[in-house]
Amino acid sequence: MKEIVDRILQEEELARKRIEKADSEGKSMIAQAADESRKVIKDAISQADISAKGRKEEAYKVFIAEKEKALGQTREQISGKIEARSKDIPAIAERLFRRIVG
């Protein structure tokens, strides 16, 4: 009878050790999965940051190009108006001179 009890106790001890090993392996797997998920998240954040910076730089370049284009158009308009006005100056000066003299 003692042999049967000893055998049962041995089986219980083996079962307890298997359960502890399985628990330990499970915890290790969970820790590894958590580490891998953190790495994936970190990589995704890094890629999103790089992508956002790229889009920001591209938007800034487009903004600068549009600004330069608008400035160029404004300069052309102003040059045209200055040129047109400079042609009117002699006629205006002559009219003023005739009013003053005449």
Image (spheres, rainbow, N blue to C red):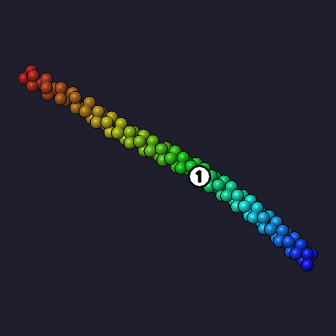
At horizontal 18% and vertical 26% (from top left) the residue drawn is 93
At horizontal 91% and vertical 78% (from top left) the residue drawn is 1
At horizontal 89% and vertical 72% (from top left) the residue drawn is 6
Q: Is residue 38 left or right of residue 78?
A: right
Q: Nearer the viewer, residue 71 or 26?
A: 26
Residue at the top extreme, as displayed = 101
Q: Nearer the viewer, residue 37 or 6?
A: 6
Q: Where does residue 88 sit, x and y in percent of width and height? A: 22, 32
Q: Is residue 94 left or right of residue 64?
A: left
Q: Where does residue 15 sit, x and y in percent of width and height? A: 82, 70
At horizontal 21% and vertical 27% (from top left) the residue drawn is 90
**Count of all numbered marks drawn on residues in the image:** 1
Q: Is residue 13 above or below residue 46?
A: below
Q: Is residue 33 left or right of residue 92?
A: right
Q: Is residue 32 above or below residue 1?
A: above
Q: Where does residue 4 sit, x and y in percent of width and height? A: 90, 77
Q: Is residue 71 above or below residue 90?
A: below
Q: Nearer the viewer, residue 63 or 69?
A: 63
Q: Residues within 10 Å of mark 1 (few under 14, many from 20)?
A: few
Residue at the front extreme, as displayed = 2
Residue picked out by circle 1: 45
Helix, strand or loop at label 1? It is helix
Q: Nearer the viewer, residue 65 or 11?
A: 11
What kind of residue is marked 1? Answer: Ile
Q: Where does residue 38 sit, x and y in percent of width and height? A: 64, 55
